Every structure is written in C-alpha cells, then in structure tokens.
Amino acid sequence: MKNRLKESNGDFVVDIINIFLLSFILIIVLYPLIFVISASLSDPMEVLKGNVWLLPKSINLDSYMRVFKNADILIGYKNTILYTVIGTIINLGMTIAAAYPLSRKKFYARNVLMAFFTFTMFFSGGIIPTYLVVKQLGLVNNFWVMILPGSVQVWNLILMKTFFQNSIPEELHEAAYVDGGTNMGVLFYIVLPLSAPIIAVMVLFYGVGHWNAFFNALIYLSDRSKYPLQLILREILIESQMDSMMSSTSDTIADQRLYAESIKYAVIIVASLPVLMLYPAIQKYFVKGVMVGAIKG
C-alpha cells in the first residue's frame, strides 16, 4: 500500500512538472503568433512606439486592405494554391503507388528498391547537377518545376510503407484475393479506405511543404506571374520591396515607412492562415497516423 501511495505521489509530481513545462513551451510558441496578429491589426504608430506587445492597440485594418489591393500578393496566392493542390495530389498518388508494392512481402524486389530509395536520403547530386537535369527536361521557368522534382519524399514513403505493412492485416489481403480481388482492387477498395490516418498525415506534410516552398521558385522561376506567395513574402520581408504595395498619391515617404512594419505582419498572417486552418480539421487523423507510421517501423 505504501509503495502504491509513493508511486501515486510521484506520478502527481511528474504530472505537475509536465503541466508547468508544457504551459511554458505553449507560451513561448503561442506568443509570437499572438504578437504578429496584434501588430497587424494595430495602428502602425503604436507598433513603431512599441506599445503593442500582446493585444491590439487602436485597431486599424488599413494594412490588410493594402495587402489585398496588391496584384503580386493576389497572383502569388493563386499560384501557391495551384502548386499546393495539384502538387499534393501528385505527391499522394506517387507515394501510394510506391509504398504499397514495397509493403507487400510477395514483392521480392522490395528490399533492393527500398535500399535505392533510402540511399537518396543520404546522398544527392547537389544544386548544380539538379539544375542541369531540370534544364534538360525543359522545366526551367515552367509551372511544373514546383511540383515534379519533389514528387516523392523518401521519409514520407517510409511512413506510408510502414503503415501499410503493419496496420493492414495480411489476412485481409488473402480474403480479398480468395474472393477474386486484384491488386488494384484491394488497394482502392480495402487498403485506402482503411488508411485515412496516414493519408491525412501525407496531405498535411506535402501540403505544408508546397505552401512554404520558395527555394525552387528562387532558382528556377524568372517570370513573376509564376511566383508563389512565399517568394513574394520573401521580397517583402527581406528585400523590403514595399513601393508597389503602398503606392498611393496621398502617401509620403514617412507614411510608407510608417505602414511598412504593419504590412509585413499582415502579409505573414495572410500567408499562414490557410495552413493554420488546415491542421485542426485533420488533427485526429494526424496524431494517429504519425504514431502508427513511426512507432511500428
């Protein structure tokens, strides 16, 4: 009885420590987001004076109005949505097409092919050879350069393969084959309906990757009409190209500098909002999919 009481007291102390640490980490992670939202909604003068540190001061939506009036932001938003939706569909299809055969024990070449896939995680040709390959394929300054070169991520492939291999009972496959099912039929009518958790994980991983992608655009794209939103955001945050966004006949140089900071915060919120809205919608699948795909490997 005493041992059980000691264990209970020890568990209680550990729980208190965990709650304190997790609350502290939550504050550290959450505060920058709250500050950016408050700064984007506040009067620019209050932001420059340093009066905004938690809640908005003198709410002003002029920064958002200027952001959505900017043609580059709207074009970048459209391009990023296209890259994300089309890219995620292609990523998901190709990852499933590779992961399912590699998860089947009757596929005798699976170990050799998996070794080739794994090799690419540790060694790559580098930026220059990759650029030359992309150029030879005619993808430079092309819409598909943002999608095709990274069609399959090996780590995601391993996660999905592990899920198929450990979470779908072998007896289920055998029963389907006895009933006359084909490999494609088993995949589409049995395996995929049971794989909602890992599919949700892949959608989030690939979708966020496409939404935040800017490096390929920086290297391969020269036509501004094909720029993704993140490349426009990079120009605003790093290169401080605010002229087109703040062009107004009534704006003086002082006004432009005044609005510069709040516009940066508004652009960050506009660029991050879709991803922030996506995660809660698939959270229950996300947690289950990551745990099953990672732990049982």
Image (tube, helix red, strand yellow):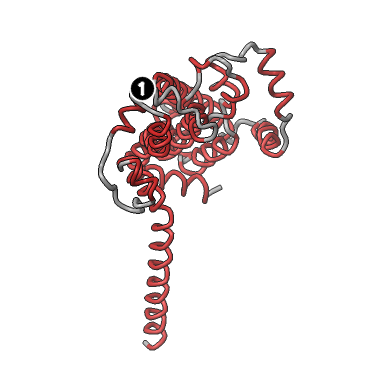
Can I make out residue 200 in this image?
A: no
66, 160: nearer the viewer: 66
Name the side, left or right, on which 153 lies relative to 228: right
Can I make out residue 260 in this image?
A: yes
Quadrant of the image occupied by residue 11: bottom left
Position of residue 50 measured from the top left corner of the image (x, y, whole percent): 38, 51
Q: Secondary structure at mark 1?
A: loop
Q: Quadrant of the N terminus?
A: bottom left
Position of residue 268 measured from the top left corner of the image (x, y, whole percent): 41, 37
- Residue drawn at 34 percent across, 50 percent down: 52
33, 199: nearer the viewer: 33
- Residue drawn at 41 percent across, 62 percent down: 22
- Residue drawn at 50 percent across, 38 percent down: 164
Tell how many labels: 1
> Looking at the image, is 229 positioned above or below residue 111?
above
Position of residue 281 measured from the top left corner of the image (x, y, whole percent): 32, 39
User: What residue did someone put label 1 on?
Assistant: 248
Quadrant of the image occupied by residue 24: bottom left
* Label 1 Cα crowd, 10 Å radius (few <14 / some 14-19 / many 20+): few
- Residue reaching furthest top? 138
Quadrant of the image occupied by residue 126: top right
Name the side, left or right, on which 139 lies relative to 290: right
47, 3: nearer the viewer: 47
Position of residue 65 measured from the top left corner of the image (x, y, whole percent): 30, 28
Amino acid type, label 1: Ser
271, 295: nearer the viewer: 271
- Residue drawn at 39 percent across, 70 percent down: 15
